[in-house]
Amino acid sequence: MAEDEVYLESVALTRTLPCLAEPGKIIVIGSPSRDLSDVLPFLATLPNIITYNPDASTLTFRRERGFLTLYRDKVIVIQVDNAEQGLDLLAALVDAINATWTHRHELAAINTPRRAPRPLDVWALLPQSNCKVCGEATCMAFAFAVLQQQRAVEECTPLAEDAAFVDRRVTLEAMLGVGA
């Protein structure tokens, strides 16, 4: 990588805390070697973004397990197994930030806020029939399960199979960043 393409040298592990969301796991807090404000609008174009607030310079990604939040001057990763895994995640983050920065000219920086869908946002796009075919008692319960990644959109049989719901399904998949 050319010198001007390296945005971030490192993220130093500064602290660990017990993770209240999942006992036995830790929260890893890191300090980037450089202010992240300039790279956040480009990182906001990546998949798995839950929220982005350009005014506060914060960006939250969904990880396979837990979340990773970037601030201009710190990084917080929750539900980490141990400090060694935390160091590995921070090193991978540096690589991802530098790769994004290298390709920033190919990306359209995002400068507007993004927020995670809420249960009512998902519910509004579901059939709202409470048919229970998905295994949940109500469409609202299914909406919560989808947002918690315990259920997939295609598990809603009416939404997946009824042509009358194609627009809703496509909108829901786009909102959640899933689907074909």
Image: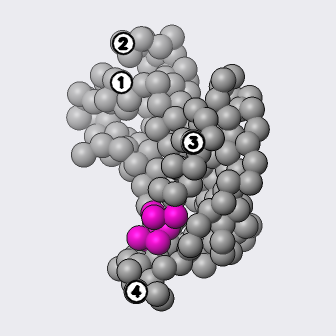
Mark closer to the chain start, 3 or 1 = 3
Label 2 element class? loop
**How many other residues sit within 10 Å of disc 2, few (<14), some (14-19) or many (≥20)?**
few
Image quarter of residue 166: top left
Q: Residue at x 28, y 35 (%)?
A: 164
Which badge, 4 or 1, comes first in the chain's sequence?
Answer: 4
**106 to 153, vertically: above or below:** below
Tell me the number on the disc at residue 84. Answer: 3
Looking at the picture, which amino acid does disc 1 mark?
A: Cys
Mark 4 or 1: in front is: 4
Q: In this figure, which residue is indicated by the disc labeled 1?
A: 156
Q: Nearer the viewer, residue 116 or 96?
A: 96
Q: Position of residue 77 (x, y in %)?
A: 63, 46
Q: Main secondary structure of the magenta part?
A: helix
Q: Please, what is the three-letter code of the amino acid marked with disc 4?
A: Ala
Q: Amino acid at mark 3?
A: Glu
Mark 1–mark 2 CB contact (< 8 Å): yes
Give the labeled residue for mark 2: 133
State the image coordinates of residue 79 (x, y, percent, origin top left): 61, 35
Is residue 92 rendered to the left or right of residue 158? Answer: right
The kind of residue on which mark 2 rests is: Val
Whether residue 19 appears in this view of the structure is yes
* Secondary structure state at the residue bearing disc 3: helix
Disc 3 vs disc 2: which is toward the camera? 3
Mark 3 and mark 2 residues within 8 Å of each other at the beta carbon: no
